[in-house]
Amino acid sequence: MIVATLLAALLHASWNAIAHWIPDKTTSVAIISLGGLICVTPLVFLADPPAAAAWPYLIASVVVHLAYNALLMTSYRLGDLSQTYPLARGTSPLVVTVLAATLIGETPSARQLCGVLLISAGLASLVFWGYRENPSRPATIAAAVGTGLMIAAYTTIDGVGVRRAESTLGYIGWLMLLEQVTIVAFATVVRGRGMWVRSRPIWHIGLLGGAMAVLAYGLVLWAQTRGALADVAALRETSIIIGALIGTIWFKESFGAARVLATCAVFAGIAVML
């Protein structure tokens, strides 16, 4: 479970870097969604369909995922990757812990709660230190925090839904299919079919990002059938460290002493949870 979740974190940070790199965010999310659609379509035909009890969760998750994508692209349009990505991802672990305890009775142990708090503190400090030196518009913070709340919502919904699906691959396939079809259709209506012609030079990168996104979330859903939702959510957010490194190396964003200390807090949290 731990290895799968950490691999998901690596893949997640990578596809988010691709999404941030593509200038037109509508085109970005469209190409990435198309790549995801290509990857998940075979699952719909090859895997057993989700059980009836899982469908309310699946439909609710699709709606929340659409809101998540809209807020994510808005935050990337307004701010830097190394600031918006940590704030969005760092918001969710504590919220998931509370939701899991409240809704499905997954009360964390003292060790688990300590690990979640350490990881959340480290992740939050990654972004707030940057904002202290370079304050951003309130809209940027609002979009990033909203993204984090949507992450917490769909993580909790899918954590319950995938357990009731009786088919992990079927749940993944239908969730991604419905989500990606909706996004691709919406982007085509908004930008027109010419969007696909104009984006041809970067298709291969966007499609790779889509494949990464599907595999990343597929690994998370599988991990949620093997471990507590709070543990998976906290471990998954180590992608912020990778995202911060990508922002430093690829986008030339600063990574100072404060972020090194934040990184240590995250790894300490992981060690406590292991």
Image: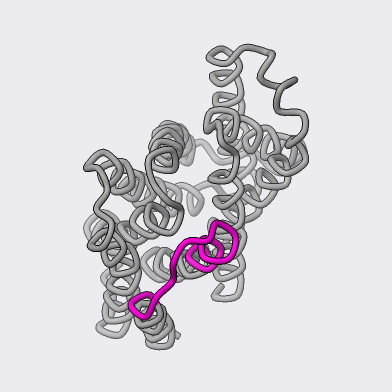
Q: Nearer the viewer, residue 139 or 152?
A: 139
Q: Quadrant of residue 137?
A: top left
Q: Nearer the viewer, residue 55 or 192?
A: 192
Q: Nearer the viewer, residue 108 or 146?
A: 146
255 inside magenta stretch:
yes
Q: Position of residue 59 (x, y in %)?
A: 45, 32
With respect to residue 274, does 53 lie above or below? above
Q: Position of residue 45 (x, y in %)?
A: 76, 35
Tell me the quadrant of the picture where the N terminus can be found: bottom right
Residue lying at 77% horizontally and 28% vertically, measured from the top left: 200
122 inside magenta stretch:
no
Q: Which residues are magenta?
A: 243-259
Residue lying at 44% horizontally and 71% vertically, measured from the top left: 255
Q: Nearer the viewer, residue 131 or 25?
A: 131
Q: Position of residue 52 (x, y in %)?
A: 51, 36
How was this image coloured? one colour
11 displayed left or right of 74: right
Residue lying at 66% horizontally and 19% vertically, measured from the top left: 195
Tell me the quadrant of the picture where the C terminus can be found: bottom left
Residue lying at 34% horizontally and 50% vertically, measured from the top left: 148
